[in-house]
Image (cartoon, rainbow, N blue to C red):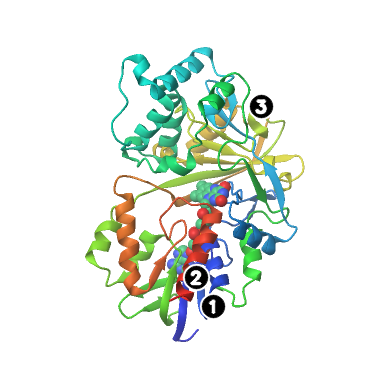
Amino acid sequence: MQDIHIPTLIIGAGLTGLSCALHLQQDYLMVEKEQEPGGIVRTRTKPGGFHCDGTGHWLHLRNPYTKELVHRALGDNIVEYTRKASIHSKGVFTLFPFQANLDGLPREVILECLTGLWKARHPEDFGMSQPDGPPTSFEECILRLFGTGIASHFMTPYNEKLLGVPLSEVSPRYAERFVPKPSIEDILNGAFGQSKESLGYNASFIYPRVGGIGALPKALETLLEVKPHYGLKLEAINLAAKTATLSNGSLVRYDHLVNTMPLVDFLKLCTDLPEIVTENAAKLRSSTVHYFDVGVRGPGAEGSESHWVYFPEPEFVFYRVGSYSAVHKELAPAGCRSYYVEISGGYDAFRDRPDDLRKRVREDLIRGRILSENDEILMMDLCTIPHAYVVFDSHYEASRASVLDGLQPFSVTSCGRWGGWNYGGMEDAMLEGIQAAKQINNA
Ligand SMILES: Cc1cc2nc3c(=O)[nH]c(=O)nc-3n(C[C@H](O)[C@H](O)[C@H](O)COP(=O)(O)OP(=O)(O)OC[C@H]3O[C@@H](n4cnc5c(N)ncnc54)[C@H](O)[C@@H]3O)c2cc1C
């Protein structure tokens, strides 16, 4: 590629970049450092013939347009599933979400959860007053919504394991989208075995019949007239001059730039960043997730057929174990099963001891009744997602807004889960790509 001028340069061919390209009404150049589209939304075949996504990637669609887009791209390569998610706590499995499915837990735990709920909703019955003002942290939000029992048995330990930070540091906004908020009636029904399984944003989902979740970005790519350039990396940006240097040495002059690579990494490549942007970028935090793809042959145990299982208790090193093959059996060879075992903060103690971590994960999978003693592990592959979950701390919203706004005068739109430094799913990624395209089309 020679030095060129292009109206729009798109960094990254994940779902955000692909959907942006698809909706742009002007010429673009899309560069992707990998050899195929999808970013984390790719499916790799591991030793033994296990097809693994970048941990579970199940597609929940709410927006009519993205539904149409995904159906246009995948055609009949779609299967719909109903969630089978559970929680392992106090040695038993209960259904997800915890707060609406207390049945099965020890009686004293159920009592503690229900009493805590009552106290939280009606503090005056216990001689306490209603708290003043809105909650100031996620921890406070959980306590006000569900009380101390549900908080201490699930909400707090699970979310602290996932995010790797105390919930007192997390903004209450975090609860808005991702915490199912059943009514008191649903919680009481769930405590007496009459649960509604459809609570929460991910009660059903779709998945490609063939090709794993990686089939989705590949299908979107086929809709593009101008394909991404693979194996080509953004190396530097001169914001003032609106030029980008790529790994093949070419210099690209652009009118608009759409970034979808992780925002903090993108900013490190930029010259001429305003000081306020640099200062606020330093406050953006994320958690790193390490996960094992595991391929197994054997009889399995009680929890092996759940689509995914949450493990809130600290004695388990992982916070969640999902099964690719329990959802879509074609992802594992005949007679085998496959899992993704997700670890966040718990990884640090094993940083330099990967063999000990493998041993611990196997032991915990057996203790957690996902694997049986007789299961033969055929494959166990450790992978890392450097920026997995954005930490919604007290700096988050103002810092993020300052950074994204600070890039606008340079005609840079940074969007998507990591480009926009947000907690979004695959549908959000596609919507953000479309939004970026519309903004440029209308400029
Ligand atoms: C653990 C986990 C589980 C998830 N599960 C689900 C789920 O079940 N359902 C759901 O809907 N969503 C899920 N998500 C969210 C989903 O993965 C994201 O919303 C989506 O993949 C974001 O796409 P993107 O295009 O914004 O980012 P990316 O996919 O990261 O795209 C960015 C692209 O930029 C490329 N790139 C990076 N640096 C450069 C460079 N210097 N030059 C050129 N290219 C570069 C990357 O290779 C990548 O292809 C999950 C996320 C995580 C972390």
Asked whether 192 or 220 is in front, the reply is: 192
Instruction: Give the side of residue 77 with respect to residue 141, left or right.
Output: right
Q: Position of residue 354 (x, y in %)?
A: 47, 41
Residue 25's disc number: 1
Distance (Cα) linking label 2 and label 1: 8 Å
Hey, which residue is sitting farthest left in the picture? 275
Asked whether 20 or 39 is in front, the reply is: 20
Q: Residues within 10 Å of mark 1 (few under 14, many from 20)?
A: few
Q: Judge whether residue 230 can be spotted in this image.
A: no
* Disc with the residue nearer the chain's start (3 vs 2): 3
2 and 1 marks in contact (CB < 8 Å):
yes
Q: Secondary structure at mark 3?
A: helix
Instruction: Give the side of residue 4 with respect to residue 215, left or right.
Output: left
Q: Residues within 10 Å of mark 3 (few under 14, many from 20)?
A: some
Mark 2, ligand 1, within 8 Å: the answer is no
In the rendered view, tell whether residue 274 sits above or below residue 194.
below
Name the image quarter holding residue 78.
Answer: bottom right
Instruction: Give the side of residue 69 with respect to residue 247, left or right.
Output: right
Q: Residues within 10 Å of mark 2 (few under 14, many from 20)?
A: many
The amino acid beneath tag 1 is Gln
The amino acid beneath tag 3 is Glu
Residue 302's disc number: 3
